Image (tube, rainbow, N blue to C red):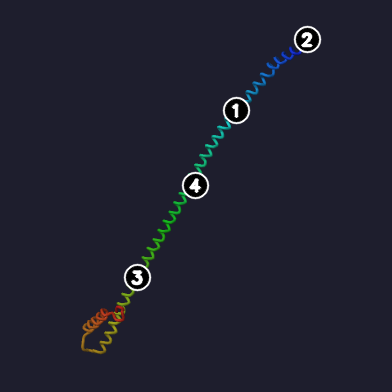
Amino acid sequence: MTIVAQILNFLILVLILKFVAYKPVMKMLKEREEKIARSIDAAEADEQKAKELLAEYNKQLADARIKAQEIVDKAMKRAQEERDASVAETRREIEQMRKAAKEDIARERERAAMQLRGEMVALSMQAAGKIIAANMDNKTNEKLVSDFIDQLDKDKMGGLPC
């Protein structure tokens, strides 16, 4: 009979534990399982979001590199164009200075030739005046000397114009 009482006590204890301890523990375990499942889902969603953000960041970084390279290329092209323009401007200025120098030389040569021609006329007049003395008038002397100098100019004595 004690065995029957012990079995009966055991069954009553099992029923009491089932309602008092087992159900609340099972309920708590189920809630914990659901909470862990939600945390895993949230972590997976956060991981997916992080992957998307990383992909977008990498895309923006690549775009920024492309834009930076374009800016560098444009700056180099602009610098080359400015350098070419500066070289062209310098060449143009040098050519203008060379042309101006040639014109100045030509003017100076012409002025020197005219001055030399004038001095030759004067010297020729003096020489002719002494030789011819009084036979001819001044106007005829100047005409003869001028014709003589023009003839010398045409012949270009010494390779230079008189």
Image coordinates for residue 3, horizontal then vertical, percent: 77, 12
Q: In which quarter of the image is the N terminus?
A: top right
Measured in 3D between alpha carbons, the distance from the residue under mark 1 to the one under mark 2, in whole angstroms, is 50 Å
Measured in 3D between alpha carbons, the distance from the residue under mark 3 to the one under mark 4, in whole angstroms, is 55 Å
First-in-chain label (2 vs 4): 2
Determine which residue is flagged by label 3: 102
| Residue type of the residue flagged with mark 1 | Ala
Determine which residue is flagged by label 4: 65
Q: Name the mark nearer the viewer: 3 or 2.
A: 2
First-in-chain label (1 vs 4): 1
Q: In which quarter of the image is residue 10?
A: top right
Measured in 3D between alpha carbons, the distance from the residue under mark 3 to the one under mark 2, in whole angstroms, is 145 Å
Q: In which quarter of the image is the C terminus?
A: bottom left
Determine which residue is flagged by label 2: 1
| Residue type of the residue flagged with mark 4 | Arg
Q: Name the mark nearer the viewer: 1 or 2.
A: 2
Image coordinates for residue 160, horizontal then vertical, percent: 31, 78
First-in-chain label (3 vs 1): 1
The foreground one among 42 and 156 is 42
Measured in 3D between alpha carbons, the distance from the residue under mark 2 to the one under mark 4, in whole angstroms, is 91 Å
Could you tell me which secondary element the residue under label 4 belongs to? helix
| Residue type of the residue flagged with mark 2 | Met
First-in-chain label (3 vs 4): 4
